[in-house]
Amino acid sequence: MPRAKKPHSPFRYFNSSPEIIRLVVMMYVRFPLSLRNVEDLLAERGIDICHETVRHWWNRFGPLFAADVRRQRVNRMRGFRQWKWHLDEVYVKINGEMHYLWRAVDQEGEILESYVTKTRDKKAALRFMKKALKRHASPAEITTDGLRSYRAAMKELGNAGKQEVGRWANNRVENSHLPFRRRERAMLRFRQMRAYKSSSRSMPTSTITSTSNAT
């Protein structure tokens, strides 16, 4: 009987150790640093790499590391009976065009799902919530702001009774936008949807989807 093949390591074609690669990627993702800032900080620690290497590792391994962290976190929280979600939307300009970033986080601020649309109507809210519910199942409570699109979408999904709306109740998800805004400033805003997706995917525990056809 043939032996089962071991999965290939994603680091097999790289001369640097996985520990160094993870350090570089997490430095760039965790802190509002430019590529050259990371290069300089690593040089002070005796690690000689180019800022373009930082960019390549971020694009290659950022989504991989973020997905692994999110998977472990969500698997632990699914068994929690009082799992609460916080939903919010925030505008972002991509190549000069206005888009909306929808986000779902849990009661501890961990990002569960993200979604990008050009509108924030009922149709957009419904697509976002269907995707989040399909991936993570239904929570015990969903906190939103006063946007009417949420209530209309939740009414159609049959979970309007789980909605909670309060002036300060949604601070948890609003605070989750801060790292994204810092990254946006460090990159001098997003000129392409591809750069925006890469930045969002590499944020810890986040995923990103877009309905836009922009490139």
Image (cartoon, rainbow, N blue to C red):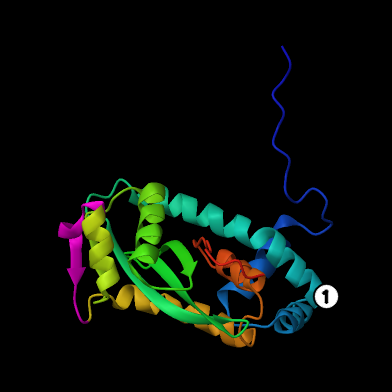
Q: Does residue 47 appear in this view?
A: no
Residue lying farthest to the left in this orientation: 161
Instruction: List x then y, in percent, for residue 6.
Output: 70, 32
Q: Secondary structure at mark 1?
A: loop
Q: Quadrant of residue 24?
A: bottom right
Q: Does residue 95 appear in this view?
A: yes
Q: Residue at x 52, y 61 (%)?
A: 209
Q: Is residue 107 left or right of residue 15?
A: left
Q: Residue at x 35, y 71 (%)?
A: 121
Q: How many marks overall? A: 1
Q: Quadrant of residue 95?
A: bottom right
Vertical order, 118 against 182 (above or below): above
Residue type, label 1: Cys
Q: Residue at x 30, y 45 (%)?
A: 79
Instruction: List x then y, in percent, for residue 208.
Output: 52, 63
Q: Quadrant of residue 161?
A: bottom left
Q: Nearer the viewer, residue 200 or 9?
A: 200
Range covered by the magenta-colored residues: 157-167
Q: Residue at x 62, y 86 (%)?
A: 186
At label 1, counting other C-alpha atoms closer than 10 Å, the crowd grade (few under 14, some 14-19, many 20 or more) is some
Instruction: List x then y, in percent, for residue 135.
Output: 41, 49
Vertical order, 159 against 96 (above or below): above
Q: Is residue 2 left or right of residue 147?
A: right
Q: Nearer the viewer, residue 78 or 193?
A: 193
Would you name the residue on which mark 1 appears?
50
Q: Nearer the viewer, residue 210 or 168?
A: 210
* In magenta segment, residue 133: no
* In magenta segment, residue 166: yes
Residue lying farthest to the top in this orientation: 1
Q: Nearer the viewer, residue 1 or 98?
A: 98
Where the N terminus falls, by quadrant? top right
